[in-house]
Amino acid sequence: MKILLRFAGIDSWNRPVFKSKDGSYYGSTDKIYNMDVSPETIKKEITVKDLVWFGNEFDCEPMGNPLDEKIDFEIIWEDHERWGEKW
């Protein structure tokens, strides 16, 4: 099973947040950024290994659960067609 993630933005806690197609949110609680950080910086510095499950809402209190190692997570940066729709 593969779950594709797209960069959703920086939340009010300055955490990079990613969203899956099913509406789940993932992010980093260890690496934080200013609100005006460029997506290019996030792309260079964040990998799937940095992410934990946040929950079902943007800007929520993270659940903190590490990602399931049995699931193949992939961050999609440019290839919007792999998401299956325009973002």
Image (tube, rainbow, N blue to C red):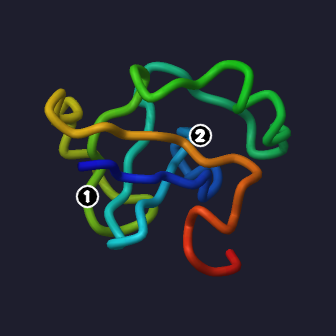
The residue tagged 2 is 14
- For label 2, count other residues whose C-alpha is less than 10 Å away and answer few (under 14), some (14-19) or many (20+): some
Q: CA distance from mark 2 to mark 1?
A: 16 Å
Q: Quadrant of residue 53?
A: top left
- For label 1, count other residues whose C-alpha is less than 10 Å away and answer few (under 14), some (14-19) or many (20+): some
Q: Residue at x 22, y 39 (%)?
A: 71
- Label whose residue precedes the other's in the sequence (2 or 1): 2
Q: Residue at x 36, y 71 (%)?
A: 23
* Viewer-nearest residue: 75 or 41: 75
Q: Where is residue 11 drawn, in percent x and y?
A: 56, 52
Q: Quadrant of residue 64?
A: top left
Q: Quadrant of residue 75?
A: top right
Return the mark for residue 55.
1
Q: How many discs appear? A: 2
Identify the amino acid type marked 2.
Asn
* Viewer-nearest residue: 36 or 67: 67
Q: Residue at x 44, y 29 (%)?
A: 48
Q: Where is residue 14 drawn, in percent x and y?
A: 59, 40
SS at mark 2 in the image: loop
Q: Quadrant of the C terminus?
A: bottom right
Q: Eyeballing the image, is 35 above or below 25?
A: above
Residue farthest along the bottom direction in this orientation: 85
SS at mark 1 in the image: strand
* Viewer-nearest residue: 67 or 12: 67
Q: Residue at x 56, y 52 (%)?
A: 12
Q: Nearer the viewer, mark 2 or mark 1?
A: 1
Identify the amino acid type marked 1.
Gly
Query: Is 59 placed left or right of 75 in the picture?
Result: left
